[in-house]
Image (spheres, grey):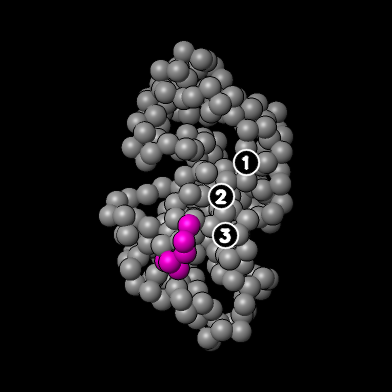
Amino acid sequence: MTGDLGKGDATPVQSLSPIDTSDDIARGLAYLSAADPRLDAVIAEAGEVPLRRSEPGFASLASVIVSQQVSKQSAAAIWDRLTRLIDPLGPAAFLAGGEDAWREAGLSRPKQRTLVFVSEAVLEGRLDLDHMCRIDGAAAIAEMTAIKGIGPWTAEVYLLFAAGHPDIFPSGDVALQAAVADAFELPSRPAEKQLRTMAESWAPWRGVAARLFWSFYAARRGRAVMPVDS
């Protein structure tokens, strides 16, 4: 376990179960407050920190891919069209839908290619998305990013929401970078590597820390936000 565990009353936690309930969020916030007192003000301003869980599987990963580098509103519109055109949305059905359906849904060429690669990997048994939610986070990220088109951000966000992984922090996320900069009054958004280092002090509850900073960012900006790949 990484991080500065000498602050406050934080107690080292060797192994955590998935984030499944609001009580898990509350436990994580209590730990973070004790481990890093700077987060008390962030917690106060953030208000409610939602659970944000999804069912493991192809549709959950597809929704993460759809949301990359677009606004929440655009992602919702694309997802609505895609799931109306291909229902139910699974890897075989996605491939059968073909380019006409993909274009009509509004999927960009890169996202079409990524979803084709993912669909093929799932159907060929090279990617078991349920299994990814049951193994170590680092191992799951390594397996997922071996699939062409899946980067660390996509894998991390999937594991946060589909697996409820307690200790993943997608430091390449633009909203998280902006939120941390706001919270700590930094002169600019921290780069991915810098933010990853900063987040080490929030282990083993980095999954709750990510939710906290997204909620803080939403409260500070006055609107709902979603993970956004840099």
Mark 3 or mark 2, which is nearer the start of the sequence?
2
Q: How many marks?
A: 3
The residue positioned farthest toward the bottom in the image shown? 9
Image spot of residue 186 (x, y percent): 47, 64
- Could you tell me how far apart the alpha carbons at marks 2 and 3 are, in whole angstroms? 8 Å
Q: Which secondary structure type mostly characterizes the magenta part of the structure?
A: loop
The residue that mark 1 highlights is: 151
Task: Name the residue beneath numbered marker 2.
Answer: 172
How busy is the neighbourhood of tag 1: few (under 14 within 10 Å), some, or many (20 plus)? some
Q: Residues within 10 Å of mark 3 (few under 14, many from 20)?
A: many
Amino acid at dot 1: Gly
The type of residue carrying mark 3 is Leu
Q: Quadrant of the N terminus?
A: bottom right
Residue 64 placement, left or right of 141: left
Q: Nearer the viewer, mark 3 or mark 1?
A: 3
Viewer can see residue 17: no
Real-space CA distance between mark 2 and mark 1, rounded to the nearest whole angstrom: 10 Å
Q: Secondary structure at mark 1?
A: loop
Whole-percent x, y for residue 123 in the image: 65, 28
The residue beneath circle 3 is: 195
